[in-house]
Amino acid sequence: MKAIDKSDFSEFVDNLIEDDDREVVGVQKKDSKFAFDPLYESDDLRLDYDTTILPPKKYFMPQRETLIEYNIEKGETTPVNRVVPRIILGVHPYDLVAIGQMDKVFEDTHEDPYYLEKRRQSVLVGVNMENVSDKSFASTMGTATIDSGYDLMLTDIGDRYAIEVGSSKGSSLLEQAGAAVDDAKPEEIRKVKQFKEDLPEKFRSDPEFDPFELPSLLKEYYDNDEFWEENSEDCLSCGTCNLVCPTCYCFDVKDVNDISLSEGERMRTWDGCMLEEFAEVAGDENFREEKAARYRHRYMRKGRYMYNRFGDIACVGCGRCSEQCLPDIADPVDIFNQMKEGTS
Amino acid sequence: MQTRAELERKNLDSMENPYSSVPAEITSIVDESPTIKTFELEPDEPMEFATGEFIQLSVPGLGEAPFTPSSSPNVTDTLEVTIMEAGEVTGELHDMSEGDTVGIRGPYGKGYPLEEMEGRDVLVVGGGVGLAPLRSLLYMLTAQPDDFGKICLKYGARAPDHLIYKDQLDDWGSGASEIDLELTVDEGDEDWEGNVGVVTNLLEDLEVDTEKGVAVVCGPPIMMKFTTQSLLDYFESSDIYLSMEKNMSCGFGMCGHCQLGKYYVCKDGPVFTHDQVKDIPDLWE
C-alpha cells in the first residue's frame, strides 16, 4: 500500500489536468447532488460524495454513440469508434463491481470494440466510501469494499490518502506523482483495514435478505401477478431506474440521418426495459405490454437472469433507482424484504 | 500526428467489428402477396448460413431488422428473404428495386437441428409469412428425402391471395413432390375450393408417425400458441420445434431486447423446443 499527503494529491491531480493527454474526470458537486464530470481544477473534486446521479458507465457506454457512418448516395459505410482516453477519479467500490460485470457482457458472445476500447484506454481511480447515501445498501450486497477491479483505490485516512494499487495501469499513473508517494506506514494500513470494517455501520439497517437468496426468491415470486401488479401500480414507465442503474446496459441501434438525408450515423443509444416500446415488434405485438410485466422483468434481470448467465447478482446496492424514482416505488430493499417476509 | 479519423479507424482495426454489414445487391423481387415480397440478395462476400439461423438486414437511413432466410443454405452465392411490410425498415424495403443495395450481417442464432430430424417423419406447420423460414427447412428436407421420413406441410393464411410461394405450393401439392401439403385460409373467395378455417383444423387426422416424428411450427404468436396446444396431444414436448420472434438490436446476446426467461432468442434460439420454453409464463403474450 502507498500513501500521499492530501495537498500533494491535489497537486498531482492538477498536474494531470494540465499535462496528461487523457481527459481527467471526477466527482463534483452538481446543485444538491454529485456527478462525474470533466475536471478543470483539483479543488472541484469531491471524494467525500455519497453517490452520483449517473454511474460512470456513461464513459464506456455513452448515452448515444456512433457505430457506423453511412452515405446513402455513395452506398458507403464506415465504422468509427470515438474513444476519449480518460482518467476517472473517485469511483466507489459498488460502481467498480458494476463495471466488472459489464466487462463480461461486452466480451461474452462477441468482443464489442466500442465498449472495450474505451475501457482499455481509461484508468479507474476508486475511492472508499466516506459518506453513504440513505438509500444505498451496498454492504448488504457485498459491494461496499472490493479487492480488485480498480487501477488505484484511495482511502481517506485523515491528512493523507492511502492508495492501493490494482494494476500496472494504476502504478504507472502513480509514477507521475513522483516522490510525493511513499509506502504506507503500518498504522496507515491498519487504518484502512479499520475503515473498511467500520463501513457497514454507515448503511441503512433495514435489509432483511441475503443476496444469494435472490435468485430463488425471485423464481418463487415470478408467477405472483398480484405482487408485481401491486408494486408497479404507480410506475410511470419512465425508465429512470434503468438509466441510473450501473448494471443496466440494454441498448438500441438505430439510424439517424443528417439534414441532407444522404448521410447519417448508425447509433447505439441507451434503452430500458421499463419503457413501453422495449419489447415491441413489427405488427403491433408487444411481449411486455403491461407495466407489471416490465417491472417484474427488471427484477428478474437483476436477481436471476444475469446470475444464471454470468454468476453475478446484477444489483450492486447503490440505491440510485430508489433515490431517483418519482413515484418512489423502485427501492429494491422494499421488494426483496417483502419477498423474504412472504416466504418465511 | 494522427488525425482523429485515423485514430478512430485504428481502434477498430484491432478488433473485428460485430456491427459491420456486408453490402448485398437485390437481384430479384417476387411479389408473394399484397403485403409480402421475397428479395433475392447477392452479397459482396458469400454468407453461409444453416437453415433457421437469421441475419440482420439493414437499410441505411432506416436501420436494421432481423430475418431468417427463406432460401436453401445449399445455394451460397445468393440468399432470399421473404418480408412482410410491417414497419419502417420493411416499408422501405418494399419500395426498393432490383439493383438497389442493402447491408447484411450474421448469420446468428441456432437454427433447425436437421440431425435430430434424420430418419423421422416431419410435420411442418406454418402461418402467414411464418412459412418463410420453414421453406428453407423444406428445401433441406427435400434435398435428401431418403434421410428423413414422411414430410407433411400444413399451411394457413388469412385469404387465398395471402398464401405465399404460390408456385412452390402448386408443386408441393401436385403429388409428385415428397411433401404432403394441405392448405387452409381463414376466409375464402369465389375461386377458393379448399379448406376454410384456422390451421389447427388441419391437425386432427395426422398422416405422420407422431410418436417418432417431430413437428416444426412458425407463424404469428396466436397461431403458434394454439398450434402448439393441439400438437401436444400427439407429440412429445421435446419434439416440437418453435421459431420464436422478439425485438432484437444486436443479434448476439448483448442488447437485452430479446430475453425470454433465461434465454436470449437471438443467441439460444430463434428455434427452441417446446420443452425448453414451456415453463415460461406469458410465452405468447
Image: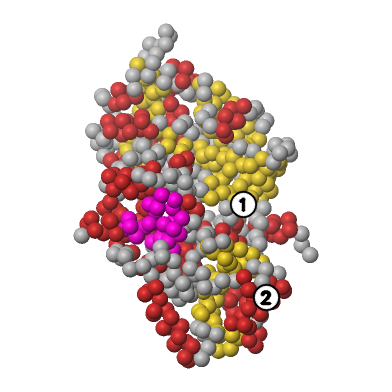
Report the front residue among B193 and B226. B226
Tag 2's secondary structure?
helix
Going by the numbered disc 1, the residue's amino acid type is Glu
Q: Is residue B84 above or below residue B285?
A: above
CA gap between label 2 and label 1 equals 29 Å
Prevailing secondary structure class for the magenta stretch in the rendered image: loop
Do the residues at pointers 2 and 1 share their chain? yes
Of pointers 2 and 1, the one earlier in the residue sequence: 2
The reply, left or right, for residue A291 in relation to residue B232 is right
Q: Name the residue tied to disc 2.
A: A14
Bounds of the magenta segment: A312-336
Residue B165 vs A138, above or below: the answer is above
Question: Closer to the camera, B122 or A27?
Answer: A27
Residue A47, how many percent across, how many down? 54, 73
A97 part of magenta stretch: no
Say which element carries label 1: strand
User: Residue A65 bears which disc, if any?
Assistant: 1
Name the residue at the front extreme.
A32
Q: Which numbered disc covers residue A256?
A: none
Residue A99 at what x, y percent from top left? 50, 64
Which mark's residue is nearer the viewer, 2 or 1?
A: 2
- What chain is tagged by disc 1? A
Residue at image coords 38%, 52%: A329
**Measured along the vertical axis of the image, is residue B235 above or below residue B182?**
below
- Residue at 61% over, 37% down: B62
